[in-house]
Amino acid sequence: MADRLKGKVAVITGAASGIGAETARLFASEGANVVIADMQAEKGQAVAKELGDQGVFCQVDVRIEEDIASMIDLAMTKWGRVDILYNNAGFGGALGPIETTTMEDYDLTFDVLVKSVFLGIKHVTPIMKAQNSGNIISTASVAGLMNGVSPHLYGVCKAAVIKLTETVSLELGEHNIRVNAICPGLVATPLTVGKLNATDEDVENLRKSAGGNQPLGRAGVPDDIAQAALFLASEASSYITGHALVVDGGIRSGPTWSQWPEYMRKPLPLRLYRPEGA
Ligand code: NAD
């Protein structure tokens, strides 16, 4: 299949790298025109170039309302509509113990991870309402659903993205606008390497070394998430809204079998535990 998004216009933030870049490629291969929005100009332009006439780069800082407005404007000027907004830009946020987190880092984390999603939804909503159709997707994280897998504020922000997805889906449903989130587990990208300028080799080394924690035995790759975004963006999911789709190799369910205590994995005849005579 290569026409699941034929004639659609998509705006994707964080599309210069990792999950966003792969989603831009997949959406274009399915027939969409794509605005590649990111703060990294060189990488973003390279992704847009790969897409030819179907891609255009827009330099944005997703924390800034005017930038979000002009990103949506660009899609309207160039292609006259916005069918899909994918709020995906992000970073790891403030690290370390709670008592050393500065207010500056707190604000930066919330602005990049939550305010950006709010602004994207705010600015695309009038257009989608006028179209009486639209599809909003945001990248949350399993860290918004479980604890101990990310820094404090990252998990809090991703939980907020899930909540915003749910509440806004209630408001926009009657305008035929679906609103969903994706909760990735560990995906090998520059973000998880911990460096915006991580090389392909850094990312590949992480992918190879991080397999053991996932029940499915491998780390995620950007295409795993892009395929979920395609599902949510396409007609295949036409009755799904207000949903947080977990795509994590099983990690949300708990530790992989080989990490369970040995006494739980060893087969023992149950009769040893039966009361006398049972
Ligand atoms: P990535 O670093 O490869 O891509 C993130 C992109 O966001 C980069 O291109 C970066 O330039 C852009 N960006 C960051 N801050 C921005 C800003 N202020 N304005 C504009 N652009 C900005 O990382 P990724 O793993 O592809 O991350 C994509 C999304 O997936 C993020 O929201 C992240 O939190 C989420 N996520 C990632 C993982 C994972 O394991 N990689 C897991 C769960 C959720």
Image (cartoon, rainbow, N blue to C red):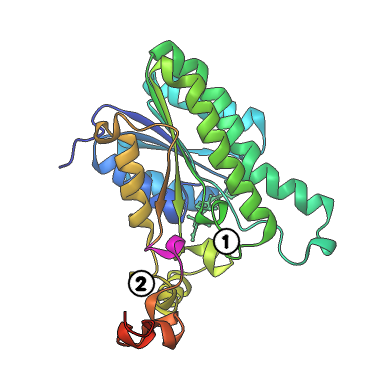
Q: In the image, what residue occupies the spot 58% across and 39% down?
A: 60
The percent coordinates of residue 278 (x first, y second) are 31, 79
Q: Nearest the camera: 273 or 91?
A: 273
| Magenta segment | 249-254
Above or below 256: residue 69: above
Tell me whether circle 2 and circle 1 mark residues in contact (CB < 8 Å).
Answer: no
Residue 73 in view, yes or no: no
Q: Nearer the viewer, residue 9 or 97?
A: 97
Residue 103: percent from the left, percent from the top?
83, 50
Q: Depth check: give the residue in front, 175 or 77.
A: 175
Residue 5 got which mark?
none
Q: Is mark 2 within 8 Å of ligand 1?
A: no
As displayed, is residue 169 above or below residue 206? Answer: above
- Provide the residue designation for mark 1: 196
Q: Amino acid at mark 2?
A: Arg
Looking at the image, residue 69 lies above or below residue 137: above
- Count every numbered label the image shows and give the total: 2
Q: What residue is drawn where x is 55% and y is 29%?
A: 167
Element carrying mark 1 = loop
| Residue in front for this viewpoint, 193 or 271 | 271
Q: Is residue 145 above or below residue 243?
A: below
Q: Is 90 within the magenta? A: no
